[in-house]
Image (cartoon, helix red, strand yellow):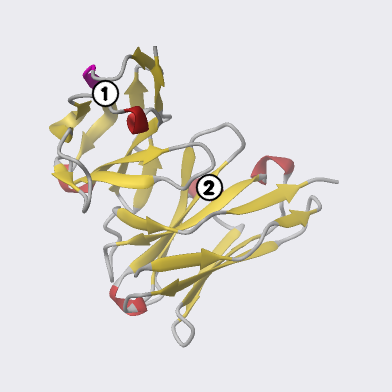
Amino acid sequence: EIVLTQSPGTLSLSPGERATLSCRASQSVSSSYLAWYQQKPGQAPRLLIYGASSRATGIPDRFSGSGSGTDFTLTISRLGPEDFAVYYCQQYGNSMGTFGQGTKVEIK
Amino acid sequence: QVQLVQSGAEVKKPGASVKVSCKASGYTFTSYSISWVRQAPGQGLEWMGWISAYTGKTNYAQMLQGRVTMTTDTSTSTAYMELRSLRSDDTAVYYCARDWGATAARGVFDYWGQGTLVTVSS
């Protein structure tokens, strides 16, 4: 099973600042099968990024994804008040899916 | 518009079974697949498994093998997830999500159900 480790666990930032979230895999992941989700309290997750770097429909261009192999990054260029949430990376490979443990982006 | 509407909250005793439904609308059901994801209280997301709505093929998370069964009813565009031999640590919100792959999992979940809380308690 591929284990995804996200860092940091919590990111304390102010609106307007840049957020950089990391996702490291225990073995190489196909970029085509790496996605990022945002989840707010009491809500279902929302797809942000798929294929490591493609934005899902309706996602603002301040969200961007990058990386390959075992290291992937989600960047939020300028945090809006609605961006404070928990973010999960997720991969699918070898007929199994796994999620990272999440990074909480909180208001400083 | 695409919608996934799940069945209501359940309370079960340890050892019992639960079956959660997920009714899809707004798209051709058999052109996509369904994954199930759960989230224990205050915890992260856990992938449970996947089913092709076109072929009925399934893949299950190893830790749930033998306790979980996923099925679909194409006549009603509904997916089902049954979990047996429930334990207290199965208490969670269970989500269905549409996966882009029709015959093979794509691992991209673009629409989600609203979630179903399953509580396991004696």
Q: Amino acid at mark 1?
A: Ser
Instruction: Report the chain holding disc 2.
Output: B
Q: Residue at position x 32%, y 14% from top?
A: A14
Q: Residue furthest right?
A: B122
In-front residue for pair A59/B42: A59
Above or below for A47 versus A84: below
Place of residue B15 in the rendered image (x, y in percent of width and height, measured from the top left): 78, 54
Q: Quadrant of residue B100?
A: bottom left
Residue A60 part of the magenta segment: no
Place of residue B99 in the rendered image (x, y in percent of width and height, measured from the top left): 33, 61
Residue A18 part of the magenta segment: yes
* Badge 2 element: strand
Place of residue B31 in the rendered image (x, y in percent of width and height, measured from the top left): 28, 75
Q: Residue at position x 58%, y 31% from top?
A: B42
Place of residue A58 in the rendered image (x, y in percent of width and height, measured from the top left): 22, 51
- Residues tagged by mark 1 and mark 2 found on one chain of the structure: no
Prevalent SS, magenta region: strand
- Label 1 Cα neighbours within 10 Å, binned few <14 / some 14-19 / many ≥20: many
Q: Residue at position x 49%, y 84% from top?
A: B76
* Badge 1 element: strand
Residue B37, can we see it?
yes
Span of residues in magenta: A17-21
Q: Which residue is mark 1?
A: A22
Residue B38 numbered tag? 2
Q: Amino acid at mark 2?
A: Arg
